[in-house]
Amino acid sequence: MRILVTNDDGIHAPGLATLEEIAQKLSDDVWTVAPESDQSGVSHSLSLNDPLRLRQISEKRFAVKGTPSDCVIMGVRHILKDHGPDLILSGVNRGQNVAEDVTYSGTIAGAMEGTILGVRSIAMSQAYGPGGRTGIKWACAAHHGPAVVRRILEVGIEPGILVNVNFPDCEPGAVAGIAVAAQGQRNQALLAIDARTDGRGNPYFWLAFAKARFEPGNGSDLKAIAENRISITPLRLDLTDEPTLTRFAQAFAE
């Protein structure tokens, strides 16, 4: 099985090294094509107004000056054009990608692009908690990742579907199980603007989430992570809402 690995945190990210470790436990034919720099939050964007610069790091590792979607396209259509990948793994992201995160995430976008190109694709992210980015428990994803991917492949991924996997903020032995979960929804009232002033008196702003008690919905990816469970959420490329489609069709036919 040929595996193409990518991410959105960049070619030097520790999560990418973790994902390569996971992939190497699944196959001896692993290729990496990742962004030259951090591309977090770029979603499913493409570099249409800038050239893609490709840098080969080693025999099967490449960096692209572009987005995760650019990387997947370069991997499938250029680097591996004569023998494409059987599986695309994107991540392991630094921080969870649950609820509304999936619409912003470059990690999800890498798997989305792979799905568009007809390749089975899985996005993987590692949650972290109050300890911040310096205390991320990569061992959780590294330990459980291979078995989760194997099981997903055994069950099968239908065309047009990508799989979003999130590992909880705990050590491998503290994982409470696996939850096949729906995409959750946060309380957007907690979204805030953090206004500041720089040294020259000019205002600038950070997007931030206010700290308040929030109870995630049952059956959601947010709930799974809160309960130290690995969340697995299948996502569709087709964003059409069928009930509304039918309702609109009836209304406009009148």
Image (tube, rainbow, N blue to C red):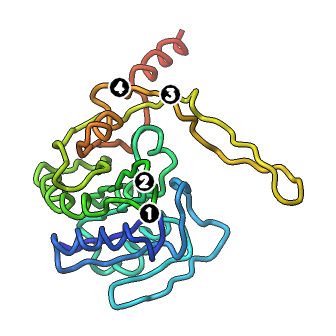
Tag 2 and tag 3, C-beta contact below 8 Å = no
* Placement of 218 over or under 37, stated as above or below: above
Three-letter amino acid code of the residue under disc 3: Asn
According to the picture, the residue beneath numbered tag 2 turns out to be: 131
Residue 209 location in percent, x, y? 57, 38
Viewed as shown, does residue 230 lie left or right of 209?
Answer: left
Q: Which mark is residue 217?
A: 4
Q: Which mark is residue 134?
A: 1
Look at discs 4 and 1 and give the one toward the viewer: 1
Three-letter amino acid code of the residue under disc 4: Gly
Mark 4 → mark 3, Cα distance in angstroms? 11 Å
**Disc 2 or 3, which lies upstream in sequence?**
2
Instruction: Tell which of 149 and 216 is nearer to you.
Output: 216
**Disc 4 or 3, which lies upstream in sequence?**
3
Q: Residues within 10 Å of mark 3 (few under 14, many from 20)?
A: few
Taking the spot 45% from the left edge, 59% from the top edge, the residue there is 133
Three-letter amino acid code of the residue under disc 2: Gly
Q: Quadrant of residue 237?
A: top left
Look at discs 1 and 3 and give the one toward the viewer: 1
Tag 2 and tag 4, C-beta contact below 8 Å = no
Q: Is residue 232 visible?
A: yes
